[in-house]
Amino acid sequence: MDIREYQYFRTRWGLAGSTYYKISEASNIYVRAFFSDFHNYGDRFAYTLDDNTPGIQVLNPANVGQGAPTFNAQLRNPAIGIGNLMLGGVHDLTTTWFSWDVAVSRAFYGNSPYSTAVFNSTLTSSACQYDPVSSTSEFLPRWSTACYNEAYNPSNLVLNNINRDLGTSAQLNIEASGSGAKRYHIGSRLATIEIGGRFRNEHKYSDGYVLTLTPNSAIPLTTFPNRLNNTNYYNGGQYPLGYNATYEDAIAYANANPNLFTSVSTQGQDPQEFDLIEKVSAGYVMNTIDLSSRVRLLAGVRVEATDDNIGNFSVGTFPCVPPATGTCNSLNPNKFSGSYITIEPSASLKYAISTNDNLRFIYSRGLSRPDPDQLAQPLLWTDNGNGANRYSVQFGNPNLVAETGDDVDVLYDHYMNTFGLVSAGYFYKYLRNPIVDQQSQLLNYQPPGGPLGNYLATQPVNAGSGWVSGFELAYLQHFTSLPGAWGGLGLSANYGYTASRANGIPGRSDHPSLLRTSPNAFNISPTYDRGRLSIRVGLSYNQASIYAYQYANGTAGGVKGPLSDVYFYTHFQVDAQASIRLNHGLNLVVYGLNLNNAVFGFYQGSPQYMIQREYYQPTFSAGLHWEPLREK
């Protein structure tokens, strides 16, 4: 098992702004614009300790305990930007109305977002052992003294390579839409018919590639200074912090001594690179009619046509479907296209039981397309450090088809006097071709431009079918009837129970739950609003859910051991926010996130088989928000 310790230090800065301008009050034509440019600079230091505890990295038991520690110094400084410009209008002509808009938007991500200096141990094996007796918490495992003696002795580590992810990924969207409605009567019954359409042209590309610098001879970790000391590391010093060189020192050394390194670039032949153009045309018709003073019926249908054209590299026999043993490591230019039409009917019946009580029955069909990266990016591999499965690789899958779902909902709402709401609902969703992440092991695999070794592979696949069922409860109340300052109190809360099942996962004969469906989840938010003061406290809970399926021939779903599916840990988090309205449109806003320092991470099968756990500490922020007020 690989246990990684991370420490982040970041300086963030960015610029964002938005505007809304109504060109004409009479015609109600408007312009909206938004822009954001964000930079995030930070180091990540990581130690890897190998032990005998089974886990996701121990897919080959013969290699358990045979690894040696590694140290990674990383720099993450992506440039992230997004901009949007929209022109539109809404026109109400008494018994008819119509709206329209045209928009263009662009987003980008790049500027060497991920760079790493990898240091490997000179030790041939490790004496590091997991200490179950001293491990009183599954989130704070304990290790033998040998673990730290090996990993934190800088003379045991030498520079293996320096690699930089370079290039830019960007997306350009051009969109246009229009709709109109007409109110009319069928006898004495009021009705409205609405017709509309939308077109979107999405162009996304990635020019990503990797530059790798490999030393021609051993360069010890001690060549670089220790830049970090922290006696309070990891939850109050739960673990000691070892020798920390920085990526900046490593790359500066390589730039000053280019003759000591061999440079290899995958530019122009990297399987990260792709180009995708997706065009979506959609049209709908919908009619609403009041069948009586208590009953309203809404029904319609939407038709969507999707067309994809993709250029990328194929990897071996495409797609590369694991398990494989070195058969997916050749690159060839590749172009392919596909199109499909989806019909999405919907209907809703609302029955007003009383003035404050409504019962609704809803049927609808929805569509979820594959992400562009899932379709177009052939392969992306990562060096995780040492261990039985030192490397990981993500495959795309151009054979993915869109996921559709038929939903049936029954909802009840009760509106309380003053201000309040109680609602309850049951839902059932039948899914066709749900897209899930499948994990597997590749032995003696070598991706294009990467090293030979054992890889933990992830690939999105269509899983045949599935269903989700459950119920939801919600409560919202402002206690304005309370005397004095107590009248500002309020409460918002909801609870949901979900059961799910996936059928036909390739390589599996069992029927696990769908990905990321927590059986139990709730949110509780006490509020206070009075005068210029507004306060919100949020308590959120999500029970453990499956993050990724293991490729285990149907045995993993019912097994809670170290080779079972990968789960998110159960997560409970406390947040808070307060704002005070000042004068002239100025507001003071303060908030605190993750006040309880909740754990985030993954485990395999059962919580004791931990893969990764992360603590981010609380985040506090204060700022001023200004909205110019129109003079009266």
Image (spheres, helix red, strand yellow):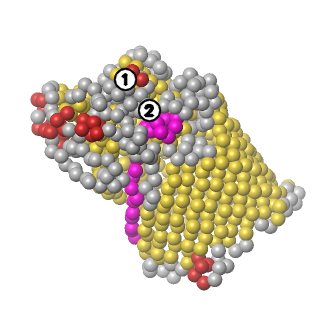
Horizontal relation, residue 410 to residue 442: left or right:
right
- For label 1, the crowd category at 10 Å Cα-Cα, with few meaning under 14, some 14 to 19 and many 20 or more, is some
Residue drawn at 29 percent across, 29 percent down: 126
Along the line of sight, which residue is nearer the eye, 149 or 331? 149
Number of numbered callouts drawn: 2
Residue drawn at 57 percent across, 67 percent down: 526
* Residue 97 position in % (x across, y down): 67, 59
Residue drawn at 74 percent across, 53 percent down: 411
Q: Is residue 470 visible?
A: yes
Q: Which residue is mark 1?
A: 63
Question: Amino acid type of disc 1?
Answer: Asn
Horizontal relation, residue 268 to residue 335: left or right:
left
Q: Is 251 contained in the magenta span?
A: no
- Whether residues under marks 2 and 1 lie with C-beta atoms below 8 angstroms apart, the answer is no
* Residue 360 position in % (x across, y down): 77, 54
* Residue 545 position in % (x across, y down): 55, 41
Q: Is residue 346 visible?
A: no
- CA distance separating discs 2 and 1: 12 Å
Residue drawn at 61 percent across, 48 percent down: 520
* Residue 174 position in % (x across, y down): 49, 45
Along the line of sight, which residue is nearer the eye, 333 or 397? 397
Magenta stretch: give its range. 603-624
Horizontal relation, residue 433 to residue 346: left or right:
left
Helix, strand, or loop for circle 1? Answer: helix
- The quadrant in which residue 626 appears is bottom left
- Viewport quadrant of the N terminus: top left
Q: Which residue is mark 2?
A: 55
- The quadrant in which residue 433 appears is top right
